[in-house]
Amino acid sequence: MAPIEHLKRTVIQCSLPAALEAMGERWSFMILRATFNGLSHFEQFQTTLGIARNILANRLTRLVDHGILERRACDDDRRKVEYRLTPKGEALLPTLIALRQWGEKWEAGTPNNPVLVDAQEGKPVADILVRAQDGRPLGLHDLRWVDRADIERAEARCIYTGEPIGAK
Amino acid sequence: MAPIEHLKRTVIQCSLPAALEAMGERWSFMILRATFNGLSHFEQFQTTLGIARNILANRLTRLVDHGILERRACDDDRRKVEYRLTPKGEALLPTLIALRQWGEKWEAGTPNNPVLVDAQEGKPVADILVRAQDGRPLGLHDLRWVDRADIERAEARCIYTGEPIGAK
């Protein structure tokens, strides 16, 4: 059976569309990168990113509405507003680093600078990979899609081929 | 010195903008997800994603232009065209899985279904993390930005604080 037929039989509950609703726009990623780099003020984002003020205001509002940034009074000057990453925002770090590494390898042509290193060893962070629970790196062909109900019944099988998964 | 001053002193060569130029749009991610799920024909994308034909055609062209998908004659029927992931496209897997996992934890409210499992063990793939070369998971506060030239001189130090990195 063609993959599309299997997809139609399974109700697809994937969080990627919801994640993209929050993040799926170039400027949102760029603003987020800037906050990971310590920028927090409207004027800093504006001058550093060269983004139009109305678009910047719109994207900051969206990031705040989605709980990725929080808007608060600046400690130094209570009349000023700053934008800070929430825990939900910080949790986007692996996504951003994975995309940056991909861009470095496949798009940019020049090595990233500055380099993101592990503070303890001073070495560049490892390539971000999909891994099994036991740490094995997994490629596309090591992965299968399984219906959640089948996992709960301990009868995991590929939704495309029906092949049992993880059977010893 | 404020972070923004340090950023201005360092020439920022980051591949994230280039990666977003290729991928930074909601529909591009959705089309890519569909290709990872085995879809390959224009009509399949159109009916599965419910995307307007002109937008779909535009995004497919962009993904082909960026070398993420390749356009080729279908094996079954040489008059039909199909779109397949290139190695560069397959290399986006960690980014997509990281974003999906983030969405599942922080956005969606319902668990993803189907579940992506390791074909060998039948267990869901691990959470995607930023890791050190030796495998230690790294959070935001375990990371530093270092100028590439300083790494090459074996004098890695944080671009913000000047603190030496990895000194024993």
Image: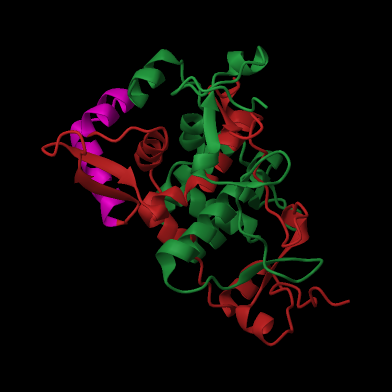
Chain colours: A red, B green
Instruction: Residue A134: give x, y in percent of width and height.
Output: 76, 60
Residue A49 covered by magenta stretch:
yes
| Position of residue A68 in the picture relative to residue A82 (left or right) | right
- Quarter of the figure with residue A21: bottom left
Can residue B52 be seen here? no
| Position of residue B5 in the picture relative to residue A163 (left or right) | left
| Position of residue B123 in the picture relative to residue B19 (left or right) | right
Nearest the viewer among A79 and B77 is A79
Instruction: Residue B114: give x, y in percent of width and height.
Output: 60, 72
Residue range (magenta) = A42-65
Counting every numbered tag in the picture gives 0
Nearest the viewer among A78 and B57 is A78
Q: Is residue B118 above or below residue A107?
A: below
Q: Residue at x 64, y 25 (%)?
A: B167
Q: Residue at x 39, y 36 (%)?
A: A30
Q: Is residue B97 above or below residue A111?
A: below
